[in-house]
Structures are given as C-alpha cells and as structure tokens.
Image (tube, grey):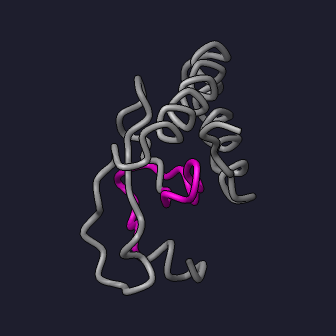
Amino acid sequence: MGPHYIVRPKVSEDLDEQAFYLANEASAEIGHRFLIAAHETFNLLATQPEMGWHPRLRHPSLTSLRVFRISGFERMLILYRPIKDGVEIIRVIHGSRDIERILTREGI
C-alpha cells in the first residue's frame, strides 16, 4: 500500500463547517471546491509529509505537529503529523484562530 492519510473525526466537522460557511457566504460551488482542495492537499501531504512547517507552539505535546495551507484557500491550515507511510490529519483550522489554545484544550 502506498502513502495514505488518516483523518481524525474532528477534521470531518472542520471540513463540513467550513464548506457550509463558504456555500452560504459565497456559493455551493466554492464550498464544494474547498472540500476537493482539502482532500487533494491531504493526498499531497501523504506523499510528502515533510512539506509543511513546524508552527511556533510552546506546548511539548505539539512539537511533532506540522502545518500546511490548503491550495486555493490559503487561510485554511491543515494541522497534521507525519506517520509511517503518510500523515495523520489532526485539524483543519482558519489561520486567524488560536491554534495552540484549541489543540491543548482538546488534549492533542
């Protein structure tokens, strides 16, 4: 089996919420395009897990975390960890949010 990605349950909520927001604020087509771009970026990261950068987070449990932007939706960040043969997608969050606070509150 080749490179793959694992999506945590919270990621599905993140994607649904953002797609719904975009569909309501822009158009259904934009919401759909966001979902496609997110999964294409997940696939890309699975093949090149070191592509993203390490965010400047202080909490020790977050040191292995990496971040990468969704193509075409650059304000949306994919938070992930490289794993054997791919990546584990932890969250998809707007870049203006307090990532460290969100993740430590969730116990990640």
Q: Relative to 41, does residue 53 appear above or below in the rendering? A: below
**Range drawn in magenta:** 80-100
Which quadrant of the rendered structure holds the C terminus? bottom right
Decide if residue 56 is on the left or right side of residue 79.
Answer: left
- Please, which residue is most extreme toward the bottom here? 60
Residue shown at the point (60%, 40%) measured from the top left: 3
Residue 95 magenta-drawn? yes
Residue 87, image x and y in percent? 55, 51
Residue 74, image x and y in percent? 35, 34
Which quadrant of the rendered structure holds the N terminus? top right
- Please, which residue is most extreme toward the top here? 29
Q: Which secondary structure dominates the residues rendered in magenta?
A: strand
Residue 51, image x and y in percent? 34, 43
Q: Which quadrant of the figure has residue 58?
A: bottom left
Which of 24 and 38 lies nearest the eye of the viewer?
38
Decide if residue 2 is on the left or right side of residue 76.
Answer: right
Q: Which quadrant of the figure has residue 90?
A: bottom right
Residue shown at the point (36%, 85%) measured from the top left: 59
Decide if residue 93 is on the left or right side of residue 5.
Answer: left
Residue 99, image x and y in percent? 41, 66
Which of 7 and 74 lies nearest the eye of the viewer?
7
Residue shown at the point (36%, 75%) measured from the top left: 63
Q: Relative to 16, does residue 55 appear above or below in the rendering? A: below
Q: Relative to 78, does residue 1 appear above or below in the rendering? A: above
Decide if residue 3 is on the left or right side of residue 71.
Answer: right
